[in-house]
Amino acid sequence: ATLLGRKLSRPLVYLIAAYYSLFDGRTKRLSRAWLTRVHGEAPKFRSVFRHIMTFVQVTLDRIYFITGRVTSFEVTSSGQDHLAKQVASGQGAILLGAHLGSFEAMRASGQEEHLPLSIVGTWENARMINALLSSLDPGMSAQVVHAGGDPVSLALTLRERIESGGMLAMMADRAGPNEKTVEVDFLGDQASFATGPFLLAAVLKCPVYLVFGLYFEPNRYELFCEPFSERIVLPRGNRQAGLEEAIVRYSARLESYARRAPHNWFNFFDFWEKPD
C-alpha cells in the first residue's frame, strides 16, 4: 500500500472483500443481520459486499492517514469550530466516537489542527494492526492511553490531561470485559452500552462532544463534531437514571449517523446479544 499508493491498491481491497463476502459465513451473516435491521429488508449480495468492502477500505486508509498521505482524499468537516473554541478556552474535553466509519480520519484532522488529543482504549483485540500503525508513526504512541492497566493510575493520567487542556478521545459503543452496561433502545431493540465513558465524564466534570468520520466511495470522508453535554451530572439519589439518560441520548445520535451511512457500521458481532 505504501509503495503503490491508494489507487493501485484498490484491487487488493476488492479481492479481500470478495473473499470474506463469499467464504466467511460468520461475517456474511452478521453483515446481513445489520443491513436487514437498518433497512427493514433482507439485503442483496452487492450490499453485503459493499459493507465489507467499506470496512476493508477504511482499514487500509488508516495507513495513509497515519503517514500523512492524504492528497487523494476529499475531506469535509462540520462542527470542528467547537473543538477550536474548546482548545482556546484552556479546558479539556472528552470526545466520544464509535466503531462507525473512521476514527483515524478524525485523529488526522485533529493533528492538522494541532488539537491536544489523547486516544483512550484497550488494544488487546487489535494488536497486529496497532503495531503496524505505530511502526509507521512512532510518535503515535505518545497519544495513546491504554485503559487496561491499573485503574488508579489511569484515572490520575486522564485527570492530568484534562486539567492541562487535553482532549480524551474514546469509543463509547462497546463494553469491555466485566464492564458495567446499561440497556437502551437502539434501532428498535434493547442493546447494551458501556457506562464507563459517561461515568468518566461525570467524574472529570468536563464538556463532552460527539465525533464521527463517515466514509463514502470512492475517496470522501465527512467529519462531524457536535456538542453533547457541557457537563454530565449524575444525581446523588439516582445515579443510574442520570447514566441512562446520557446513554439514551448517545444511542439516538449514533443511530442517526448509522442510518446516514449504514455501510460504515464496523461492529461485526451481534450488537443486540444480551451479556451473560
Image (tube, helix red, strand yellow):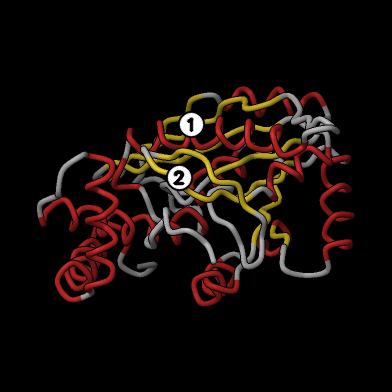
Residue at x-position 26% and y-position 55%: 33
Q: Is residue 183 above or below residue 175?
A: above
Q: Is residue 161 left or right of residue 266?
A: right
Left or right: where 13 falls relative to 112: left
Earlier residue among tags 1 and 2? 2
Q: Is residue 211 found left or right of 257 in the rendered image?
A: right
Q: Quadrant of the C terminus?
A: bottom right
In this rendering, which labeled residue sits more in front, label 1 or label 2?
2
Q: Distance of mark 1 from mark 2, alpha carbons?
A: 15 Å
- Name the residue: 37% across, 49% down: 265
Q: Label 1 sits on what residue type?
A: Arg
Q: Position of residue 34 (x, y in %)?
A: 29, 51
Q: Where does the image place residue 218, in percent across and percent down from the top left?
A: 24, 45
Helix, strand or loop at label 2? It is strand
Q: Amino acid at mark 2?
A: Gln
Residue 155 drawn at (x, y percent): 85, 55
Whether residues under marks 1 and 2 lie with C-beta atoms below 8 angstroms apart, the answer is no
The one of 243 and 224 positioned closer to us in this rendering: 243
Q: Residues within 10 Å of mark 2 (few under 14, many from 20)?
A: some
Which label was assigned to residue 190? 2
Binning the other alpha carbons within 10 Å of mark 1 as few (below 14), some (14 to 19) or many (20 upward) gives: some
Q: Secondary structure at mark 1?
A: helix
Q: Residue at x 83, y 47 (%)?
A: 161
**Hey, which quadrant is residue 17 in on the image?**
bottom left
Q: Can you tell which mark lies on residue 163?
A: none
Q: Quick one: quadrant of the N terminus?
A: bottom left
Where is residue 198, by image quadrant?
A: top right
Report the residue marked by disc 1: 253
Residue 104 drawn above or below residue 135: above
Place of residue 236 in the rendered image (x, y in percent of width and height, measured from the top left):
86, 33
